[in-house]
Image (cartoon, rainbow, N blue to C red):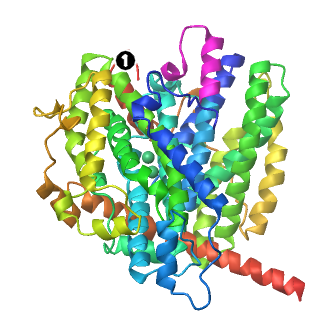
């Protein structure tokens, strides 16, 4: 990656796509309280995405606002990690995705809050408080499901196994970025290890580390997500909403 | 608020919602005043319970959960509050249908927050019903078994983005007109719940109004989308007030108990009168050729909704009844293993604590 525009865009896209996936749970959550909680987290991600996209647009200086960036780019121009675009699957998979993402975003936003770029620092300072809540929420469900019933344990372990390989992409080194993701790995491991252990879950090994999102090479899932998200906006070019 | 821009829209002030927010605030002040006046702590040992109940209701004081109340009053309230709660929960579906496709990020955030508010209303109302001695689980089961109803309006489909605006303007608008009088309901927990709910509904109504206003002042395709939506939602919204007064089974007793304050037809009229002006500002046509001001009545004459259609939708044969129920049942069934896991985990935790304490 090069430059603060790409870096900001990659964070924005992580948050935007995560919000889009989480919002899919609305009216479908296992409990009504959880419907509200997932909407809360989706709103946090969406709020962060909007701030980051607006700032990315300013950095680019080509007149693109948050909506131009969200609705008028194709999948190859999106810079999010693969983790966030994976389908929700069952609640265990969604919680694995949420937990791992939050365990990355919390140290990321914390580091960002101290970076030299004032705008990014302000966004980081706001978002890290939200990430701390997301992490608590995700960790609680990982523990409940891991150490709940036999069925929930089986599903939670399967979810962790399924999602784990996608966590490696979060930490691909980018020494020139305002925050080098590689430096966040220890904080992630420190949080994730004990939660999985308490949840009686096994931390997966294996060398498979799918990646490509930061370069715009995604899974097959993203284009469908974008087709749905962008359809109405694109059907009315130039319209105000 | 979640980092999003939720400022009040242009041109949509409390006047646009017919001054209803002001009435909610007045009801809230009244509630506080009634609490401050206090009522007799309870009936004397040898006093007639029914007479004491009547005295409290007549004095515009509130019946509270501990108080004696007629069985029929309790049953009526449980049915009404539960059906209201079910409506909030089922009502999330038609609007939730557009979250993923909202045409701007700002609209997406507002819609997501709105649907989330409706879930909150549902929980809040289930909690009010629980004060009457029934559990939320039982009530949810009654909904899932089809033994309790929800508002018929949510059995209509949302076919365009404009429907999100029309639901906000008309459906939330009708809900407020219906619910503002409930802020003065004789049952305290319901009255208090309604004050909070009405405040949020009036916010939803403004947001819907603003969506339609933007569309009605947008491209020709957007204008057509907005008009089509009002054409489809107008009569079902009028039907939200229920059958005409002559056919309404529960009204008279509910009025006497001060659960209900105005008749279905009075509320419907009020809604029509409120909407006419707003439609003019929006630049949208209300699909009623016979809509006109009646100087004698100081109200608009209007065409009644199709009550046969209303009965058909209530009895289960609306466009989306089956889908709405299937969706709710599926969410409930798919989540069963998660709820069981949460319960098992909590039980293990409680067991561990006891072991430590022992
Ligand atoms: Fe509501
Ligand atoms: Fe509402």
Locate residue B223: give its quadrant. top left
Residue B14, x across and y down, in percent: 47, 32
Q: Can residue B354 be seen from the camera position used here?
A: yes
Residue B161, x across and y down, in percent: 33, 34
* Residue at the disc numbered 1: A239
Q: Residue at x 36, y 68 (%)?
A: B256
- Is residue A120 covered in magenta? no
Q: Is residue B178 left or right of residue B26?
A: left
- The part of the chain drawn in magenta is A50-69
* Type of secondary structure dominating the magenta stretch: helix
Q: Residue at x 73, y 55 (%)?
A: A136
Label 1 within 8 A of ligand 2 by Cβ: no
> In which quadrant will I find the N terminus of chain B?
top right
- Is residue A58 covered in magenta? yes
Q: Residue at x 44, y 62 (%)?
A: B85
Residue that lies at the very extreme toward the top in this rendered image: A62
Residue A197 versus residue B331: which sits nearer the camera?
B331
Q: Is residue A209 left or right of residue B334?
A: right
Q: Residue at x 43, y 81 (%)?
A: B70
Query: Which element type, helix, strand or loop, lies under badge 1?
Result: loop
Marks counted in the figure total: 1
Residue A152 versus residue B195: which sits nearer the camera?
B195
Q: Can residue B102 be seen from the camera position used here?
A: no
Badge 1: residue crowd in 10 Å (few <14, some 14–19, many ≥20): some
> In which quadrant will I find the C terminus of chain B?
bottom right
The vertical placement of B244 against B173, above or below, is: below
Residue B9 versus residue B60: which sits nearer the camera?
B60
Residue B306, x across and y down, in percent: 13, 51
């Amino acid at each position: 990656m090069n430059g603060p525009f790409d870096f900001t865009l990659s964070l924005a896209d992580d948050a935007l796509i995560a919000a889009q996936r989480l919002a899919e749970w609305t009216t479908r959550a296992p409990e009504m309280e959880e419907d509200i909680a997932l909407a809360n987290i989706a709103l946090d991600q969406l709020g962060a995405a909007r701030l980051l996209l607006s700032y990315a647009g300013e950095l680019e200086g080509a007149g693109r606002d948050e909506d131009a960036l969200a609705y008028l780019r194709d999948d190859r121009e999106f810079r999010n990690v693969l983790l966030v675009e994976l389908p929700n699957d069952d609640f265990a998979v969604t919680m694995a995705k949420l937990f791992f993402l939050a365990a990355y975003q919390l140290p990321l936003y914390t580091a960002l809050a101290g970076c030299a770029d004032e705008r990014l620092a302000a966004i980081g300072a706001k978002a890290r408080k939200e990430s701390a809540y997301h992490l608590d929420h995700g960790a609680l469900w990982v523990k409940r499901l891991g150490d709940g019933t036999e069925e929930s344990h089986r599903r939670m372990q399967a979810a962790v196994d399924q999602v784990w390989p996608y966590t490696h992409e979060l930490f691909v080194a980018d020494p020139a970025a305002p925050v080098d993701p590689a430096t966040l790995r220890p904080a992630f491991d420190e949080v994730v290890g004990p939660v999985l252990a308490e949840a009686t879950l096994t931390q997966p090994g294996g060398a498979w580390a799918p990646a490509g999102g930061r370069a715009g090479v995604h899974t097959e899932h993203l284009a469908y997500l974008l087709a749905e998200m962008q359809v109405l906006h694109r059907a009315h070019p130039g319209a105000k909403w | 608020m979640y980092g999003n821009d939720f400022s009040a829209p242009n041109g949509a002030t409390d006047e646009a919602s017919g001054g209803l927010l002001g009435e909610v605030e007045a009801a809230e002040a009244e509630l506080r005043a009634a609490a401050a006046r206090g009522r007799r702590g309870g009936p004397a040992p040898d006093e007639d319970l029914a007479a004491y109940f009547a005295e409290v209701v007549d004095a515009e004081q509130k019946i509270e959960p501990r108080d004696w109340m007629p069985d029929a009053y309790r049953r009526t309230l449980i049915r009404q509050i539960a059906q209201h709660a079910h409506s909030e929960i089922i009502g999330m579906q038609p609007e939730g249908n557009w979250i993923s496709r909202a045409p701007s990020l700002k609209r997406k955030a507002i819609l997501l927050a709105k649907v989330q508010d409706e879930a909150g209303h549902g929980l809040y109302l289930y909690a009010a019903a629980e004060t009457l001695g029934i559990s939320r689980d039982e009530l949810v089961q009654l909904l899932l078994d089809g033994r309790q109803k929800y508002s018929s309006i949510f059995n209509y489909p949302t076919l365009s983005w404009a429907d999100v605006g029309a639901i906000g303007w008309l459906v939330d608008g009708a809900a407020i007109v219906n619910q503002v009088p409930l802020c003065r309901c004789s049952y305290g927990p319901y009255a208090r719940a309604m004050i909070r709910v009405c405040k949020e509904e009036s916010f939803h109504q403004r947001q819907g109004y603003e969506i339609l206003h933007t569309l009605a002042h947008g491209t020709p395709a957007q204008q057509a989308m907005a008009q089509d939506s009002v054409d489809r939602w107008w009569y079902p919204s009028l039907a939200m007030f229920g059958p005409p007064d002559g056919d309404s089974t529960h009204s008279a007793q509910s009025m006497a108990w001060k659960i209900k304050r105005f008749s279905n037809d009075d509320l419907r009229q009020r809604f029509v009168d409120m909407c006419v002006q707003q439609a003019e500002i929006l630049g949208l046509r209300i699909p009623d050729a016979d809509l006109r001001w009646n100087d004698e009545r100081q109200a608009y004459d209007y065409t009644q909704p199709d009550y046969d259609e209303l009965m058909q939708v209530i009895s289960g044969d609306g466009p989306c009844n089956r889908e709405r129920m299937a969706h709710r049942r599926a969410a409930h069934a798919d989540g069963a293993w998660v709820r069981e896991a949460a319960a098992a985990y909590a039980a293990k935790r409680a067991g561990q604590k006891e072991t430590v304490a022992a």
